[in-house]
Structure formats: structure tokens, C-alpha cells
Image (tube, rainbow, N blue to C red):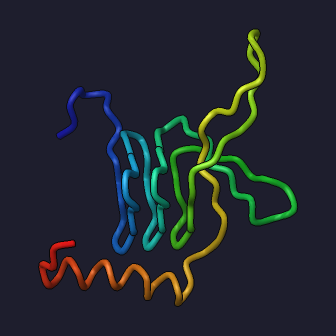
């Protein structure tokens, strides 16, 4: 059950890796085995910018499976000037090297090692 009734769920699918101080709030879905970099903030309205192609592709609310995502900023003009607003940058896809790094985290958790 969601509280309040109009709230949207947070869905983090299996195998996703959530970095230190990463914040994921209502209305966001993180696909299977995605990697969220440290300090990333995702809300339903955070622009998610895929920068892997020749032109950026902007979406909101969904991180594709196996995507590697880091925090970034987009320029936005206000009456007082131009400022950087937070966004999420999709910079790549999860690789075997990424799997090895995240498996170390999993092993630490499985064996209850304090760090």
C-alpha cells in the first residue's frame, strides 16, 4: 500500500547497484542490473540524459536495464542568470569489469564483513 494514496512507487529491479549517497524517490523505476553512481539523485522529474549517441536523448522516471548512470547538470536560464540544474547522465552499459566491482560489494554483504 502506498501512502499517500496518489504516491508513485520506487522500483529497483534485481541486480541493480546503488552507489553511496544515491537517492531514489517516488516515481522512479531502475532497470535490472543498472548501476547508479555515487551521489546521484533521481526523482520522477529529474532529466535522465543518455549521452552515448551523437545527440543527447532526454527521458524521465526510468533507468534502462544495465545502464551506468552518474550525476550531472544541465544549463538552465532564469531571470537572475544561467545555472546548472541536476540531471542523471547515462554514460554507458554495464560491462564484465563493472560486474566484478559490484560482486566485491556483494561478497562483503554476504559474509558480513565490516568496512
For residue 66, side relative to residue 56 (left or right): left
Residue furthest out toward the right: 54
Q: Which of the 4 quarters of the picture holds residue 70?
A: bottom right
| Quarter of the picture holding the C terminus | bottom left
Q: Is 6 or 101 nearer to us in this picture?
A: 101
- Picture coordinates of residue 27 (x, y %)? 41, 41
Q: Residue lying farthest front?
A: 115
Pick the residue in front: 113 or 86.
Answer: 113
Image side of residue 37 versus residue 106, left or right: right
Q: Work out which quarter of the rendered image holds the N terminus and state it.
A: top left
Q: Residue 4 sits in which quadrant?
A: top left
Image vertical order of residue 45 relative to residue 22, above or below:
above
Q: Nearer the viewer, residue 104 or 95?
A: 104
Q: Residue at x 20, y 31 (%)?
A: 3
- x and y percentages locating residue 86 in the rendered image: 59, 38
Furthest residue to the left?
112
- Number of numbered discs on residues: 0
Seen at 43% across and 70% down, the residue is 32
Q: Position of residue 43 (x, y in %)?
A: 46, 39
What x and y, as percent, mark residue 78?
74, 16
Residue drawn at the location 75% of the way across and 65% of the way down: 52
Q: Residue at x 44, y 73 (%)?
A: 33
| Res 91 → quadrant | bottom right
Seen in the picture, residue 74 relative to 113 is either above or below; the reply is above
- The reply, left or right, for residue 56 in relation to residue 50 is right
Q: Is residue 57 above or below residue 47?
A: below
27 relative to 98 in the view: left or right: left
Amino acid at each position: 500500500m502506498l501512502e499517500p494514496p496518489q504516491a508513485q512507487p520506487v522500483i529497483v529491479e534485481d541486480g541493480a547497484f546503488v552507489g553511496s549517497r544515491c537517492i531514489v524517490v517516488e516515481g522512479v523505476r531502475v532497470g535490472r542490473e543498472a548501476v547508479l553512481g555515487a551521489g546521484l539523485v533521481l526523482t520522477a522529474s529529474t532529466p535522465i540524459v543518455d549521452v552515448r549517441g551523437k545527440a543527447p536523448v532526454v527521458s524521465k522516471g526510468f533507468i534502462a536495464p544495465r545502464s551506468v548512470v552518474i550525476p550531472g547538470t544541465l544549463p538552465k536560464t532564469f531571470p537572475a542568470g544561467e545555472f546548472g540544474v541536476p540531471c542523471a547522465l547515462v554514460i554507458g552499459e554495464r560491462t564484465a569489469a563493472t560486474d566484478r566491482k559490484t560482486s566485491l560489494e556483494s561478497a562483503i554483504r554476504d559474509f558480513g564483513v565490516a568496512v
